[in-house]
Amino acid sequence: MDHRIRSRAGTSPGSRTFLALIALIALIASACGGAATSPATSPVASAPAAESPAAESPAAESPAAESPAAESPAAESPAAESPATESAAAESPATAAECPASAQGQTVEMWSPLTGPDGDEMTRLAQQYSSENESGITVEHVAQPEYVQKLEAGAAAKALPALTVVRVTNVGQLAVRNVLKPFSDEVMGIFGEDFASDFPENAWVRGEYNGQRYSVPLDLHPLVMYYNKDMFAAAGLEEPGTEPMSREDFEAALTALQESGVQPISIGTEFQGATLFQSFIVQFGGAIANEEGTEATYNSEAGVQALEYVNQLKQQYSPDVSGTGDPEVQGFKQEKAAIVIHGPWWISDLSTLPFTGYAPIPQVGDQFAVWAGSHQLALTTEDPAAQAAAACWIAWLSDNSVQWAAAGQVPASNAARENEELAT
């Protein structure tokens, strides 16, 4: 289950302010997108860890937090300019074409893996669109805990919905199995000709398979370093800022926290451990796979450095934390650990705790990198009328994705991330 903010109105001021920081980290995660220009050509092969949010690692799936499978980080310094911030679309959002007559009165069923509070937020948005659109389109959101299995079973039974939210790592897999359907020229026309330029290239290109578009980005979600402000103060430490801590400062903080009598950091063995490895291997100059995504390259000096560093943190500070259910986060919530690094879907729960602070993950290597995932929107029907209605909903959702930030996600839309509302 995802653990994210339930509603826009219920979002705490602290978490709303942090969304701006999350957006900055997401821009860093997408800043290498210009190099990752080749679309996926295999449902198994993924793009390189240093350039794509699609280097999959099954071990990085978090059963308790329906987090996206381990997609890879992008290596960029925090000060680097992002292509997203320079795009014309960010200055002038693309305008979708008018919804066609064929979409009139359609009922669109959408499945998703959003089984927690983020699912409630998506349902709210679907209801808002259903009541506001002038084409009489009704969108019904259905959360599916085991969504890949449900989609594959639905395909076999010819009982698929019109569209689905899909994790970026599952796009190739579901496309090659004919679960996802390619976007037609008519559908792309509904989005408008400038639609693609409103997204980081690194997120946009992941929706292609064998030269066809199968999905469009909805959001980005990088790792976050949550810290206990009270424990930092008791240890005589300044709180981390919006710039990543250096390795020297990070390790000095861990030592000071331990000397103050608390557990400095909680490291788990499931999703968190895998995504930390994928972040650090790029920080140390390596990658999970080659540029074509056809060869694993983590068995390298950088891979050894990354694995040894994660293991060192694990064995030195939290050797007994293991298993599913994100026990490393539970320890932080119970004030048993001063730091935990995890996904932004925990903002909902952790923002209710008065001691929670937020920061980018530390830079322990020569370059900054952070693991980031992405939810995307994909068609699962070939019916032209249903496709048209689904496209109208996708276009509206993208145009209004500032509201989706209330779910603890970073909108993939450049224009939405630059919206002043996210900084308030």
Image (cartoon, rainbow, N blue to C red):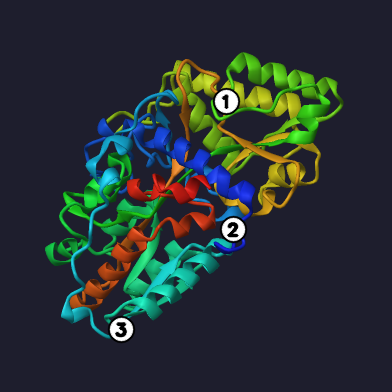
In this view, the residue in front, 260 or 145, is 260
Residue 277 on image: x %, y %:
53, 30
**Number of residues whose C-alpha sits closer than 10 Å to that of mark 1, classed few (under 14), some (14–19) or many (20 or more):** many
**Number of residues whose C-alpha sits closer than 10 Å to that of mark 2, classed few (under 14), some (14–19) or many (20 or more):** many
Separation of disc 1 and disc 3 at Cα? 49 Å
Q: Residue at x 58, y 18 (%)?
A: 246
Q: Is residue 10 left or right of residue 140?
A: right
Residue 309 on image: x %, y %:
60, 21
In this view, the residue in front, 266 or 234, is 234
User: Residue 302, relative to residue 49: is it above or below?
Assistant: above
SS assignment at label 1: loop
The answer to whether any part of residue 18 appears in the image is: yes
Residue annotated with mark 3 = 136
Q: Residue at x 66, y 47 (%)?
A: 326
Q: Residue at x 63, y 47 (%)?
A: 14
Residue 317 sits in quarter: top right
Residue annotated with mark 2 = 5
In this view, the residue in front, 395 or 134, is 134
Q: Residue at x 26, y 72 (%)?
A: 381
Q: Is residue 424 left or right of residue 376?
A: right
In this view, the residue in front, 48 or 156, is 48
Residue 282 sits in quarter: top left
Label located before the other in sequence (3 or 2): 2
The answer to whether any part of residue 292 appears in the image is: no
Kind of residue at disc 2: Ile
Residue annotated with mark 1 = 362
